[in-house]
Image (spheres, rainbow, N blue to C red):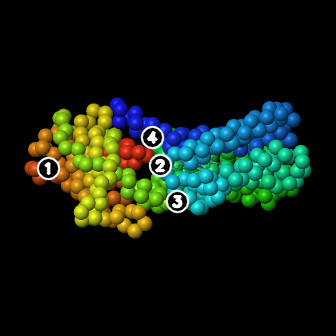
Amino acid sequence: VLTAAVTTNSQALWYMTRGFGLVALILLTITMALGLTQVVRFARPGWPRFVVAALHKNASLLALVLIAIHVATAVLDRYAPIHIVDVFIPFISAYRPLWLGLGAIALDLFVALAVTSLLRHRLGYRTWRAVHWAAYATWPLAVVHGLGTGSDTKLGWVLLINVACVGAVLSALWWRLASGWSITNATRRGVAILASVALPIAVAAWTISGPLHPGWSRRAGTPAALLAARGLTPGATSAAGTGLSLPLTANFIATQRQTGPDSSGLVHLTISGDFQGGSDGKLSIVLTGQPADGGGVQLTGSQVRLGPPTAASEYQGHVSQLEGSTVVATVSDAAGQTLSLTAHLQLGPGTGVTGTVEVHS
Ligand code: HEM
């Protein structure tokens, strides 16, 4: 329990970053949808324009507060190397520069929108309007930022939030196009319709082939040191319990530790932990490697142990494939029975590791 509490504390800021990112996106979506539907009021005399305008303004201010908390926790948290300059200047961060950079542009645009709106009476309508067009870029940039950098993109409910947000904005946009826009803007309208169909399809295709694909955290630009740190503690040894019933899919909670370099210059990353929820099993994965230039680790060896239970029925083997935080291994027991094991790991901040493990013969 103590370990769990300590781990939770050290992870709190990082989880807040991710949680507030999602809440900020929802508020930004509401802001965007209300902004889009405001124009509809011209075509619908009965439309409660002041209510919508006030909601739009309040939602945007709340979104700003939530975004501020989101970035403040990201900077304060010590897990990922994110600095205050990364909040405003895009593409310079050490952590997932492209995807974090899109968030920085979205933030810059959003701040410009907020400031010009507060000073609207001084700026004049045309200037304000020109800046307000940036709103159309803010929201999609924030969506792609969240999908691209979010460690939670693969979770079903997070995907659902994204789909709902995109659905809400598209509905508002199409409603506006259908009822709020004058015919003289036919070209703009055509471009808007085309973009509103093509962009979501492109983003969906990219999400499937990118963030939802194994190995994304490395491709997204996670620092090698963080990737390497995701993983290691000296093998858990004994385990108690019954035999494994196969095929098996279990949640996995573990700790990670890195040791070395030892006398031969090798570092050892060990992840060891237990299966949760009825499957009484233990798993330890040790990756051995040579520190590479630039902070990563060149894998030179591995050892995988799968239990329970007694030494006689322990399975041992090696990693056969390592992609991002997905580990595939083949292990066998003393009697020669061979099992395949796939572990999808989420290497948390601190020493915590969670994930799922599938085992089949
Ligand atoms: C309009 C502004 C922004 C919005 C609406 C937004 C929204 C989001 C969303 C929805 C996520 C995904 C959360 C998850 O998967 O759980 C996310 C992740 C994240 N965002 Fe933002 N964001 C914005 C700007 C920024 C900026 C400027 C930074 C720069 C410091 C930033 C840093 C992060 C970090 C560090 C993560 C988590 C990355 C990870 O899980 O690996 N965001 N953001």
User: CA gap, disc 1 to disc 3?
Assistant: 43 Å
User: CA gap, disc 4 to disc 1?
Assistant: 37 Å
Residue marked by disc 1: 333
Residue 94: mark? 3
Question: Which residue is farthest front?
Answer: 263
How many neighbours does mark 3 have within 10 angstroms: few (below 14), some (14-19), or many (20 or more)? some
User: CA gap, disc 1 to disc 2?
Assistant: 38 Å
Q: Residue at x 51, y 41 (%)?
A: 13
User: CA gap, disc 3 to disc 2?
Assistant: 12 Å
Give the structural element (helix, strand or loop) at label 3.
Answer: loop
Give the structural element (helix, strand or loop) at label 2.
Answer: loop
Q: Is residue 33 left or right of residue 300?
A: right
Please tell me which of labels 4 and 2 falls first in the chain. 4
Q: Quadrant of residue 218?
A: bottom left
> How far across and down, in percent of the image, does residue 345 sit?
37, 48
Could you tell me the amino acid type at mark 4? Ser
Total count of labels:
4
The quarter of the image holding the N terminus is top left
Could you tell me the amino acid type at mark 3? Ala
Residue 79: mark? 2
User: CA gap, disc 3 to disc 4?
Assistant: 21 Å
Q: Nearer the viewer, residue 195 or 221?
A: 221
Could you tell me the amino acid type at mark 2? Tyr
How many neighbours does mark 1 have within 10 angstroms: few (below 14), some (14-19), or many (20 or more)? some
